[in-house]
């Protein structure tokens, strides 16, 4: 007969093994994206609030299903940054916990550089986010590092910036679209559209496939035929680019995602009673 202590030890090991966490790559520069993948052996798990589970990171969900989650993470600060253990709950009430990971986030500044001198920045500083007006990155970085130097607290200011983004869901979606267009990242564009559907109408689009959304009667009834068809067609177009290597324009698809999101917001604004708006 297995002792009580042995039983709990086996249960703990099994719970960790049942939730796999992968981080790629293991070393990045400040503001460069990395991919976090979580895979649960048990479907139907409840995922945590990502901002609370990963407080040291700027998190953008890419694809979340009932047993897998793919996230893009960015750190705005250099150093050895921990991806903490992530806990999920199964439909039966069992908690699975992943192993923590440590990621080396390298500064874009050379060693012993004067932070007030933007000319000393490495070329890697191009990983910093650019404004939509096309301002050259050295000008942007110069303003950032000079402001940090004046304030005297780089970590404090960057955490404030990341926090303000997390507090505004629509701004976060707009930033996802901006990055998708800039990098021709159709996966990020698809995630932005799905998140917008969730914000505006309370429909859990991130955990549904395109075909699920096509057949979702609530979504069709809320959007109406033409807009519903546009949403499904765009997601099908992006799926073809991602999975069938369709010869389509990634930039155009990401741009169209931004236009669709604006139309989703207009519908929600006209009919607030139909949406569970964030």
Image: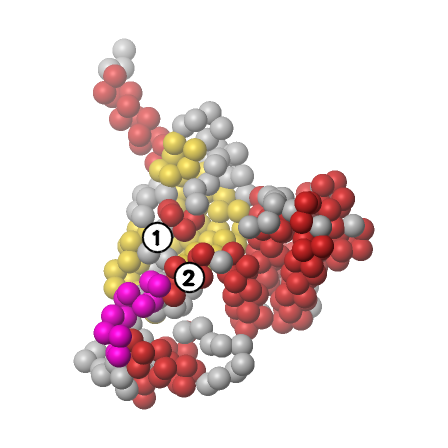
Which residue has dot 2 on it?
A: 164
Left or right: residue 257 versus residue 2 is right
**Which structural element holds mark 2?**
helix
Per the model, the C-alpha gap separating discs 1 and 2 is 13 Å
The structure residue drawn at horizontal position 38% and vertical position 65%, both measured from the top left corner, is 161
Residue 159 belongs to the span the image colors magenta: yes
User: Which residue is label 1 attached to?
Assistant: 55
Residue 223 visible in the snapshot: yes
| 120 versus 202 height, above or below | below
- Residue 48 position, x and y percent, is 43, 42
From which residue to which does the magenta span run?
A: 149-160
Task: Bin the neighbour count of mark 1 within 10 Å (Cα to Cα): few under 14, some 14-19, many 20 and up.
Answer: some
Of discs 1 and 2, which sits in the foreground?
Answer: 2
Q: Earlier in the sequence, mark 1 or mark 2?
A: 1
Badge 2, how many Cα within 10 Å: few under 14, some, many 20+?
few
In this orientation, which residue lies closer to the viewer: 87 or 204?
204
Q: How many marks?
A: 2
Of residue 13 and residue 29, the one placed in the foreground of this image is 29
> Is any part of residue 205 visible from this angle?
no
Compared with residue 122, is residue 162 higher up or lower down, i.e. above or below? above
- Magenta span: helix, strand or loop, mainly? helix
**How far from the left and from the top, in percent, is residue 23?**
38, 54
Q: With 169 as the anchor, is 121 left or right in this view? A: left
Q: Residue furthest top?
A: 1
Disc 1 is placed on an element classified as loop
Query: Residue at position x 69%, y 45% from top?
Result: 274
Looking at the rendering, which quadrant does residue 256 occupy?
Answer: bottom right
Residue at 28 percent of width and 86 percent of height: 117
Name the spot of residue 234 as percent of width and height, x first.
Answer: 70, 59
Instruction: Give the residue furthest to the right.
Output: 225
**Horizontal arrangement in the rendering, residue 61 relative to residue 213 (left or right):** left
């Amino acid at each position: 007969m297995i002792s009580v202590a042995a039983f709990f030890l086996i249960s703990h090991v099994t719970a960790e093994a049942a939730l796999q966490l992968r981080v790629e790559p293991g070393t990045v520069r400040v503001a460069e994206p990395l991919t976090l993948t979580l895979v649960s052996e048990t479907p139907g798990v409840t995922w945590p609030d990502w901002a609370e589970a990963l407080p040291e990171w700027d998190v953008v969900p890419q694809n979340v299903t009932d047993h897998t989650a793919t996230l893009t993470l960015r750190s705005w600060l250099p150093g050895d940054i921990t991806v903490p253990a992530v806990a999920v709950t199964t439909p039966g009430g069992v908690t699975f916990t992943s192993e923590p990971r440590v990621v080396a986030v390298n500064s874009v500044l050379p060693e012993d550089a004067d932070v007030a001198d933007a000319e000393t920045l490495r070329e890697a500083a191009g990983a910093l986010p650019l404004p939509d007006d096309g301002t050259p990155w050295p000008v942007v970085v110069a303003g950032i590092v000079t402001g940090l130097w004046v304030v005297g607290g780089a970590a404090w200011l960057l955490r404030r910036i990341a926090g303000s983004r997390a507090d505004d869901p629509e701004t976060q979606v707009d930033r996802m679209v901006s990055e998708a267009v800039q990098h021709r990242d159709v996966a990020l564009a698809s995630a932005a559209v799905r998140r917008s559907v969730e914000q505006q109408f309370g429909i859990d689009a991130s955990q549904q496939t395109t075909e699920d959304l096509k057949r979702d009667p609530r979504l069709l009834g809320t959007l109406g035929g033409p807009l519903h068809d546009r949403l499904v067609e765009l997601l099908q177009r992006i799926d073809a680019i991602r999975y069938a290597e369709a010869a389509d324009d990634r930039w155009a698809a990401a741009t169209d995602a931004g236009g669709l999101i604006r139309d989703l917001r207009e519908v929600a604004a006209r009919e607030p009673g139909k949406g569970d708006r964030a």
